[in-house]
């Protein structure tokens, strides 16, 4: 019997979006500029904490997009079945909150020194925008798979739920100081933190606010990409 993760036949109907790679190149450009600015700050001040924090966070922001790109390649190569795709989507969701999480790094502005406030504000904003766009892009690729695995409106329901869970993940990361890998290293403690957060009014309010904003941003992103794709199809 063939293993479902390595099955070729269960995926006849699944396909992946034909992308030109422009999104990845744009994100790489933003990341490079951000790293350059953070490096310049480190050289000027001899304080590399800023560089380490933002570089690590943007690496984590890229990870869920990397998961989606790997899933795409595996589908194109016909080496995963539907079970494997669902497993990949679960892995994507586990790390996806790391992408918009960089927005909360803007909180550090309140403790920045005045001479570098303008520079640091722009640097953090650039990293936050990079993380947010990376999360939107990976969500779009996930949505395309959900559309093929379930009915269209169920796919939208899953996307709304994913953005809400991302909002909750941001809360756990910023206020609880939990990370995605704690699901493996400290699953019991993380489970307790999740249970306690379910009864915390601040956690509920922040989850709803962050989730709603992220879903609204995703809908706008989806509309823009769909219109752009439709225009390109008409001209081709």
Image (cartoon, helix red, strand yellow):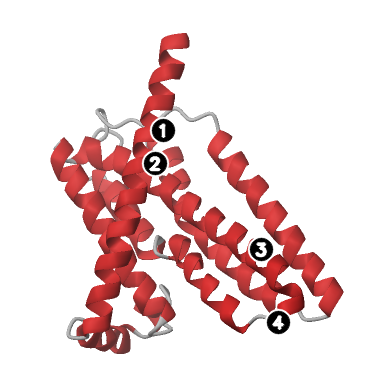
Residue at x 65%, y 61% (from the top left corner)? 122
Q: Give how far apart the Cα atoms at labels 1 and 4 are.
A: 39 Å
Q: Which mark is residue 221?
A: 2
Q: Residues within 10 Å of mark 3 (few under 14, many from 20)?
A: many
**Is the Cβ of the residue at disc 1 closer than 8 Å to that at disc 4?**
no
Question: Mark 1 highlights which residue?
Answer: 225
Which residue shows up at 44% across the image and 45% down it? 137
Q: Provide the residue designation for mark 4.
A: 113
Q: Earlier in the sequence, mark 3 or mark 4?
A: 4
Tell me the mark number nearer the camera, choosing from 3 and 1. Answer: 3
The answer to whether marks 3 and 4 mark residues whose Cβ atoms lie closer than 8 Å is no
Tell me the residue that label 3 is attached to: 123
Determine contact: label 2, label 1, CB under 8 Å. yes
Marks 3 and 2, how far apart at CA: 23 Å
Quadrant hosting residue 57 = bottom right
Q: Residue at x 70, y 53 (%)?
A: 32
Q: Earlier in the sequence, mark 3 or mark 2?
A: 3
Query: SS at mark 3?
Result: helix
Mark 2 or mark 4: name the one nearer the start of the chain.
4
Measure the C-alpha gap from mark 2 to mark 1.
6 Å
């Amino acid at each position: 019997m063939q293993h479902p993760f390595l099955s070729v036949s269960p995926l006849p109907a699944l396909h992946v979006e034909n992308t030109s790679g422009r999104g990845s190149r744009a994100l790489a450009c933003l990341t490079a500029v951000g790293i350059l600015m953070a490096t310049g700050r480190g050289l000027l001040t001899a304080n590399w904490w800023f560089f380490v924090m933002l570089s690590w966070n943007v690496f984590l922001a890229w990870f869920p997009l990397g998961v989606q790109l790997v899933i795409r390649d595996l589908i194109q190569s016909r080496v995963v079945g539907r079970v494997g795709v669902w497993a990949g989507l679960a892995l994507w969701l586990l790390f996806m909150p790391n992408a918009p999480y960089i927005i909360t790094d803007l909180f550090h502005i309140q403790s920045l020194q005045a001479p570098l406030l303008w520079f640091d504000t722009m640097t953090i904003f650039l990293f936050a925008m990079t993380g947010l766009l990376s999360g939107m892009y990976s969500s779009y690729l996930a949505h395309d798979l959900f559309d093929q695995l379930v009915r269209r409106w169920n796919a939208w329901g899953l996307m709304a739920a994913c953005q809400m869970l991302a909002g909750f993940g941001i809360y756990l990361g910023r206020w609880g100081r939990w990370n995605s890998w704690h699901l493996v290293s400290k699953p019991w403690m993380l489970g307790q933190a999740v249970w306690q957060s379910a009864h915390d009014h601040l956690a509920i309010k922040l989850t709803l606010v962050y989730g709603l904003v992220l879903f609204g941003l995703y809908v706008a992103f989806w509309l823009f990409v769909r219109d752009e794709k439709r225009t390109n199809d008409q001209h081709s």
